[in-house]
Amino acid sequence: MANLKSKITLNVELDENRVPEKINWTAQDGGITNAEAKAMMLSVWDSEAQESLRIDLWTKDMPVDEMKVFFHQTLVAMSSTFNRATQDEKMTATMKDFCDYFAEKLEINKK
């Protein structure tokens, strides 16, 4: 059986101060080619060091109101992923309660 591989590419254009101006990404297996993004969060697990490593980037023209929605949606997605990975219904419910609280406090309208 052949080893299958999938490639995800991120390209970040920086200004003279190394601040992101543009983020584009490609994931051909997902049908995404050079799509623009205003923000991204990437976490990977280093099993040897037992720690997560992160890259958090956003463009300098990312509006704050969109950043709040981005964070909310990321937290909601993380609670769903946590549930799929652990089947811990009690903690998943707690995480979802926090997501609702987060949206309420930031006055994010659910759509």
Image (tube, grey):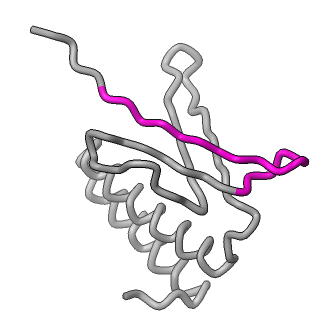
Residue 83 versus residue 46 in the image, above or below: below
Q: Is residue 13 left or right of residue 44?
A: right
Q: Quadrant of residue 59?
A: bottom right
* Magenta segment boundaries in residue numbering: 6-21
What count of labels does the image hold?
0
Q: Residue furthest top?
A: 1
Q: Residue furthest right?
A: 17
Residue 50: % across, % down: 55, 23
Quadrant the N terminus occupies: top left
Q: Is residue 79 left or right of residue 40?
A: left
In front: 14, or 69?
14
Q: Is residue 88 left or right of residue 45?
A: left
Residue 94 versus residue 9 in the image, above or below: below
- Image point 33% across, 66% down: which residue? 93
Residue 54: % across, % down: 61, 39
- Image point 31% across, 58% down: which residue? 80
Residue 52 versus residue 101 in the image, above or below: above
Quadrant the C terminus occupies: bottom left
Residue 60: % across, % down: 76, 64
- Image point 48% across, 47% down: which residue? 25
Asked if the stretch drawn in magenta spans residue 14, the answer is yes
Q: Residue furthest front?
A: 34
Residue 33: % across, % down: 39, 48
Q: Is residue 39 left or right of residue 64?
A: left
- Image point 60% across, 52% down: which residue? 23
Asked if the stretch drawn in magenta spans residue 66, the answer is no
